[in-house]
Image: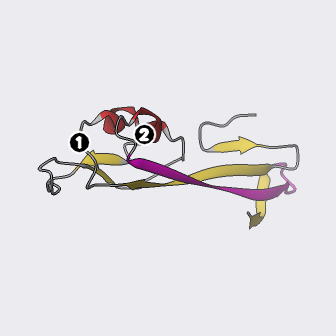
Amino acid sequence: MKLGAKYEILNTRYAIRYMTGKIFIDTERCKGCGLCVVVCPKNCIEISNKSNKHGYFPARVTNCDCTGCAMCAIICPDVVIEVFCESKTATAKSNKKGKPKLIKEGA
């Protein structure tokens, strides 16, 4: 059962898997086209105020709430974006009221 881009119920034991992403941009090769800014669903990328050695204003990462979808890396025409994902699983069990209760978190 999907609970959005970040959470997913894996089975009836209330195991929840969530993804976190880390974005790396080679700012010296970036031309600042802004395509990555437009496609990021979490607005984790913005255009920098400082120019690189070629005179372009490159994209800059904020890594605010990156899900690791890699849409930015896919659309980048200069192939200067790398996205690394980390998947974590949190396990929960039902308490007396039938609601899930977090008991442990693991990779």
**Percent position (x, y) of residue 100?**
79, 52
Nearer to the camera, 11 or 76? 76
As drawn, 86 above or below 9: below
Question: What span is colored magenta in the figure?
Answer: 80-99
Most frequent secondary structure within the magenta stretch: strand
Q: Is mark 2 on a helix, strand or loop?
A: helix
Q: What element carries label 1?
A: loop
Name the mark on residue 72.
2
Which amino acid does the dot numbered 1 rest on? Gly
Query: Left or right: where does residue 48 sit relative to residue 19?
Result: left
Residue occupying the point 23% across, 43% down:
31
Quadrant where the N terminus is found in the figure: top right
Query: Left or right: where does residue 4 sit relative to residue 48?
Result: right
**Percent position (x, y) of residue 26?**
34, 55
> Which residue is under mark 1?
32
Residue occupying the point 41% across, 38% down:
40
Query: Left or right: where does residue 28 sit relative to residue 67?
Result: left
Nearer to the camera, 67 or 50? 50
